[in-house]
Amino acid sequence: MTAVLEAVWQAVNSPAGIAAAAAIAVWLLARLYRRFPTWARYEGVIAKAVRFAERTIPDATGNTGLRRLDAALKYVLRVYGQIEGREPPKGVVRELREAIQVKHAELEAAGELGDGAAHDAG
């Protein structure tokens, strides 16, 4: 039993074993990165877009919520295009739209939107 463990230990500590361990680590990190939602990389941009829309579209406007969502989405998509160098796929647009709605609710619950929050934190 100890001979087997020693052989495994030597194999793992060899250059080939270290390279294999590194390859496994890179593979795992790549899998984790793919699971990381796209919108999370743009969370700051989304918060800024929500504040921008709240500031630029008055409450008295018809369809205020829809117009603010549209303005924030256009802002985020413009930044996405500048960073990525391409338009986002439809699935990413859907994720970003949902993230804008979630971020708006978070900012509103935290009291960062409305009368007292007419400033931009960016």
Image: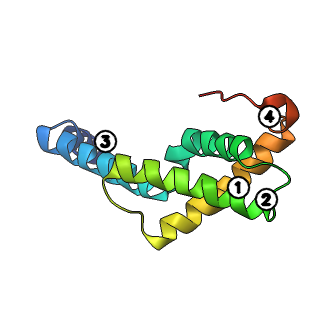
Q: Nearer the viewer, mark 4 or mark 2?
A: 2
Q: Amino acid at mark 3?
A: Thr
Within 10 Å of disc 4 (Cα), the crowding (few <14, some 14-19, many 20+) is some
Q: Nearer the viewer, mark 1 or mark 4?
A: 1
Q: Amino acid at mark 1?
A: Arg
Within 10 Å of disc 2 (Cα), the crowding (few <14, some 14-19, many 20+) is some
Q: Amino acid at mark 2?
A: Thr
Residue located 21% across and 36% down the image: 13
Q: Nearer the viewer, mark 1 or mark 3?
A: 1
Q: CA distance from mark 2 to mark 1?
A: 6 Å
Q: Which residue is mark 2?
A: 64
Q: Which residue is mark 3?
A: 2
Within 10 Å of disc 1 (Cα), the crowding (few <14, some 14-19, many 20+) is many
Out of 3 and 52, give the one closest to the viewer.
52
Disc number at residue 59? none
**First reached walking from the N terminus: tag 3 or tag 4:** 3
Disc number at residue 68? 1
Residue located 68% across and 58% down the image: 69
Residue located 61% across and 45% down the image: 49
> Which type of secondary structure does the marked residue at label 2 adopt?
helix
Answer left or right for 53 relative to 114: left
**First reached walking from the N terminus: tag 4 or tag 2:** 2
**First reached walking from the N terminus: tag 1 or tag 3:** 3
Answer left or right for 12 relative to 27: left
Q: Which residue is mark 4?
A: 112
Q: In the picture, which quadrant includes the C terminus?
A: top right
Instruction: Residue 78: tell me if it is visible.
Output: yes
Q: CA distance from mark 4 to mark 2?
A: 18 Å
